[in-house]
Image (tube, rainbow, N blue to C red):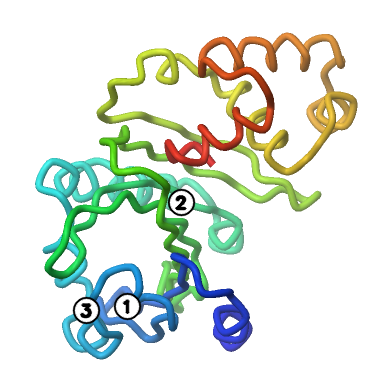
Amino acid sequence: MERHIKLDAMLPDFASFFYVIELPSQKYRFMGRHQANVSGYSNEEFMECGIELFLSRIHPEDAPILLNEIYPSYAQILADFSAPQRTELQLQYNYRFKRKGSVYLNLMEQVYVLELDDAGGPALMLGNVIELDGKSVLPVRFVCKRINEFGCPEILYSKTFASGFDQMDTLTGRELEILCKLAHGNSSKEIGELLSISRHTVDTHRRNLLRKMECKSVVELVRVAFNNGLL
């Protein structure tokens, strides 16, 4: 945990922060210094109230999706992996959060298992919260990834729960994989080698991604994907 505290201290002044939560008590063990800039609440308020404060500020349309769909799905995915493998999984989802005395913000959260208990279950969770651009209503998306032996994330599961972005809802698992690698700056040749497919196949997926997401360049593609919680 100390490494992530140091990392949080190095973050520039923008809308992103780390936190560490203890699952058995539902209490935060650490809250990043930029948290107050995002939520409007002090770190002391969050540390005292625990996850109940967080859940109380989620948009009423998004809260049931987190509680009844995303969290149970993640628990099932964790159960499908051995204890050592659980620390390789990344949960990612987005939601609307009501800032203190203000409007709703679009936030994206990435969650990792930081420590396991004696039974191999998650005891400490590390989260990274990022404020997304724009005030439009975004689709709630749940993505679970696993970091492979090469340090690259592989998408295990992806689901959209509510969206007006019909074209984005049709993205395949392979397209999401390629989208993630494009965002990491990989070329078509490099992606082909990583996924054991031809460069021609990668380029076909790139064209499909640009068409489905109505973008004209990879730069725009990555920006739109990030703002819609796909990355």
Closer to the camera in the image, 216 or 71: 216
Is residue 24 placed above or below 164 in the rendered structure? below
- SS for callout 1: helix
**How many residues crowd around disc 2 within 10 Å: few (fewer than 14), some, or many (20 or more)?**
many
What residue lies at 46% left-to-right and 40% top-to-bottom? 227
Is residue 54 placed above or below 187 in the rendered structure? below
Q: CA distance from mark 3 to mark 1?
A: 15 Å
Q: Is residue 143 left or right of residue 216?
A: left
Q: Dot 1 corresponds to which residue? A: 36
Q: Earlier in the sequence, mark 1 or mark 2?
A: 1
Residue 50's label in the rendered image is 3
Q: Earlier in the sequence, mark 3 or mark 1?
A: 1
On the image, the x and y values in percent for residue 177 come to 64, 30
Look at label 1 and name its amino acid: Ala
Closer to the camera in the image, 88 or 4: 4
On the image, the x and y values in percent for residue 95 come to 29, 47
Q: Are marks 3 and 1 in contact (CB under 8 Å)?
A: no
- SS for callout 2: strand
What residue lies at 37% left-to-right and 75% top-to-bottom? 35
Residue 91's label in the rendered image is 2
Q: CA distance from mark 3 to mark 2?
A: 20 Å
Closer to the camera in the image, 97 or 53: 97
Q: Is residue 19 left or right of residue 9?
A: left
On the image, the x and y values in percent for residue 138 come to 31, 35
Q: Is residue 138 left or right of residue 183?
A: left
Indicate the quadrant where residue 97 lies.
bottom left
Quadrant for the C terminus, please.
top right
Foreground label between 1 and 2: 1
What residue lies at 55% left-to-right and 85% top-to-bottom? 5
